[in-house]
Amino acid sequence: MMQSTTNKNLVFSNILTMTHRNLLKTLHNPDNFSDVIMQPVIFTLLFGYLFGGVIAGSVHAYLPMLVSGILVQSILNAASGSGQQLREDINAGVFDRFKTLPISPIVPLAGQLVGDIFRLLISGAMALITAFFMGWRPTVGLPALITVLLLAIFIGWSTSWIFALVGLIAKNAELIGSLSMVIILVMTFLSNAFIPTKTLPKFIQTLVKINPVSLTISAIRTILRTGQWSGNATAVFISGGIIILIFMPLTVFVYQRRR
Amino acid sequence: MNHDNIVQVRNIEKHFGDKIAVQGVSFAIKQGEIFGLLGPNGAGKTTILKMITTLLRQDAGKILLNGFDTLAQSRFARQQFSVTGQTAAIDEDLSARENLMIFGKLNGLTGAAARNRATELLTDFDLLHSADQTLATFSGGMRRRLDLAVSLIGKPAILFLDEPTTGLDPRTRTQMWQAIQKLVAQGSTVLLTTQYLEEADHLADRIALIDHGRMIAIGTPSQLKQQVGGLRLRLEVADLKQVTKAQTIIQDVLAASVHVDERTLTALLDDSGMSVVSQILNQLQTAGIAMNNFAVETPSLDDVFLKMTVGKN
Ligand SMILES: Nc1ncnc2c1ncn2[C@@H]1O[C@H](COP(=O)(O)OP(=O)(O)OP(=O)(O)O)[C@@H](O)[C@H]1O
Ligand SMILES: [Mg+2]
């Protein structure tokens, strides 16, 4: 009994150490961070000024729709960084040293992923802030805004476990980077992120409807419109939990497998 | 179980696809020993080390570290050692001190203890002045020293080093040797791999020669040399044009082959002793061949290696 509690404390403090390491790495090397800041800014500006008039009549009228789309897109982009960073770390050889330490195999992975919450937070916040500077004014209170941000971060964090798994399996960090970018682009454009779906062909509409990105965006839009948590949001939350339950152990398994 | 043998490797084997990288390798290392794995590129040294350090799973055979099986009891086995791999395993984006602190804490030290131990190691390895810079400014030798220092932060009972001095200048290499010897004096056991016969000769209490994934010999440096036997003649001819003439003279006297490397000639002497040496000297003088250098040496591990692997490469 005693043994297992001390072990748990050890795992916890080891994860803290590892998270600290990842934050230090990011702080020493802010370049790693630039994409997470730039992407939401550039996409909000581009989409807002280019398509605002066409899609919603004006930039201002488009922003309430755009903000949730950009939020989810940026969060997914930030999440994909987990896989790439993990692979870069492994290729640099440091992970071999972690593997020979008498620590739980969850520690190096969790350290990376917990550190990544910071990236998710920054990218989500940047999406909201940029929209705000372009004239978007939320009609709901601060608690609802925070809820939206937390939900987005949670979804981002759960998908970052999928990207981490990809990072462990694929050998080439650049390949992971460009592949994730393509997947995220397809997933977000084939969703309700940037456009009203009514005008789409039936076949595409079906794709858009079953796209998990659309479901997440709808849930976020509902909260931003009504200030209320919805059944849709609960479903999204539970899906995130299920992703973590499946992919966390799977990722740890692949990580500690020896060939 | 023999507790004197802190590392036991029994008949391990490793395939990569069709390729057999390691086969039938067995050895045991006693507490406090420096054991050398010596072999050329691609011999299988790193593969052996990765199996011992739980990074690779052997296809056959058994490895015990302080009695703990690396497959069945990997957590306990990992508590016995630390390893410095062939390529540096340090964080480029962190400072030397941060690298040490993080691995100190992961090794179970408290923050304060990790800080003290980090300073101790930075001092020992002559890195204190650059302790808080990022590694971008570090030379190869500094990286290598930091890499070793990180391995020592938890005061491991066994230390595995994969080619710890490859690419280092002679001064840094000597520093590294001293650091390793100091560790052993403090009670650690060391297994190192090297391509340098001189290094194994200088450092190791016992050596295993590895070639094409197999262990071709094991013993103390002097035991291995005895297997080659005899003394070795080495001389350097002053005039490059006279090398062939000198070679013929020595060959005739010894009735054995002479190895030529530019101006330097080497040959193994048999048991007949020193009389042949004066005979050679006389004949070279008569022929008017001037020499820069002349020596009778005990054989080096180079000779051992050449003899053992003859015809196999
Ligand atoms: N992951 C791998 N996949 C396929 N072959 C491998 C792998 N790792 C090593 N090998 C092969 O196994 C053999 C032994 O390699 P190893 O790295 O153990 O040699 P080494 O003695 O450490 O050489 P060096 O002195 O160059 O470091 C080589 O022929 C190598 O090509
Ligand atoms: Mg090697």
Image (cartoon, helix red, strand yellow):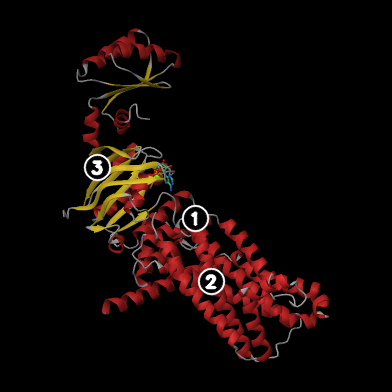
Q: Residue furthest top?
A: B286
| Disc 2 CB within 8 Å of nearest ligand 1 atom | no
Please tell me how many numbered marks the rendered image carries. 3
Indicate the amino acid at tag 1.
Asn
Please, which chain is the residue tagged with disc 3 on?
A: B
Indicate the amino acid at tag 2.
Asp
Q: Which mark is residue A32?
A: none
Q: Which mark is residue B206?
A: 3
Question: Where in the image, quadrant-wise, is ligand 1 located?
Answer: top left
Q: Which mark is residue A116?
A: 2
Q: Residue furthest front?
A: A202
Residue B304 at x, y = what percent? 29, 31
Whether A123 is drawn above or below B230: the answer is below
Q: CA distance from mark 1 to mark 2?
A: 19 Å
Report the residue at 31% width, 54% height from top. Answer: B159
Q: CA distance from mark 3 to mark 1?
A: 33 Å
Q: Dot 1 corresponds to which residue?
A: A91
* Viewer-side label of 2, 3: 2
Report the residue at 25% width, 37% height from top. Answer: B221
Closer-to-camera residue (B260/A246) = A246
